[in-house]
Image (spheres, rainbow, N blue to C red):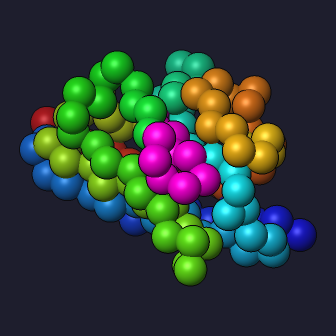
């Protein structure tokens, strides 16, 4: 059974940093893209960042503007999101996901088959 477990969320002040982690268990996805999405109350799920299987391709949402960095560690079967210069509008539940298509890395929620339960990030002003 595939399980994705996010961690690292919390309550921070504007301008602070957080590092989100997502550990995958039950199967390895060394040939699959992985991504982070987020969802704020009353809003649709929004693409944050994605990374290809070999980390040579990364994508970021327009709102990131150089503040976030995605990375992955095959040995730990994990993906990470370093978030700097956080803003109140970054407040959301952050989800990690695995693209079920081998060799692909999408930016749309429908590209992703496996999802974690999410970790809350709250940024106060």
Viewer-side residue, 34 vs 20: 34
User: Residue at left 50%, top 70%?
Assistant: 73
User: At which x and y percent is residue 107?
Assistant: 58, 27
**50 in the magenta segment:** yes
Is 73 rendered above or below residue 102? below
Viewer-side residue, 3 vs 106: 106
* Image quarter of residue 27: bottom right
Is 112 on the left or on the right of 67, as rendered? Answer: right
Looking at the image, the residue that sits furthest to the right is 1
Secondary structure mostly seen in the magenta stretch: loop
Is 17 on the left or on the right of 71, as rendered? Answer: left
Is 20 on the left or on the right of 117, as rendered? Answer: left
User: At which x and y percent is residue 44?
Assistant: 59, 20
- Split into 4 quadrants, where in the image is the N terminus? bottom right
Counting every numbered tag in the picture gives 0
Q: Which residues are magenta?
A: 48-57
User: Residue at left 68%, top 63%?
Assistant: 30
Is 40 on the left or on the right of 91, as rendered? Answer: right
User: Residue at left 57%, top 71%?
Assistant: 74
Viewer-side residue, 40 vs 97: 97
Looking at the image, the residue that sits furthest to the bottom is 75
User: At which x and y percent is residue 95?
Assistant: 57, 47
* Image quarter of residue 64: top left
The answer to whether residue 9 is visible is no
User: At which x and y percent is residue 125?
Assistant: 13, 36
**63 in the magenta segment:** no
User: Residue at left 40%, top 65%?
Assistant: 8
* Image quarter of residue 78: bottom right
The answer to whether residue 16 is visible is yes
């Amino acid at each position: 059974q595939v399980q994705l477990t996010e961690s690292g969320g919390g309550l921070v002040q504007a301008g602070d940093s957080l590092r989100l982690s997502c550990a995958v268990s039950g199967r390895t996805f060394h040939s699959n893209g992985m991504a982070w999405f987020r969802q704020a109350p009353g809003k649709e799920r929004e693409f944050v960042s994605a990374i290809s299987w070999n980390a040579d391709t990364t994508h970021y949402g327009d709102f990131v503007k150089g503040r976030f960095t995605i990375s992955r560690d095959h040995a730990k079967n994990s993906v990470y999101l370093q978030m700097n210069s956080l803003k109140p509008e970054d407040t959301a539940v952050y989800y990690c996901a695995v693209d079920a298509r081998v060799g692909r890395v999408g930016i749309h929620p429908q590209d992703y088959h496996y999802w974690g339960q999410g970790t809350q990030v709250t940024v106060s002003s």
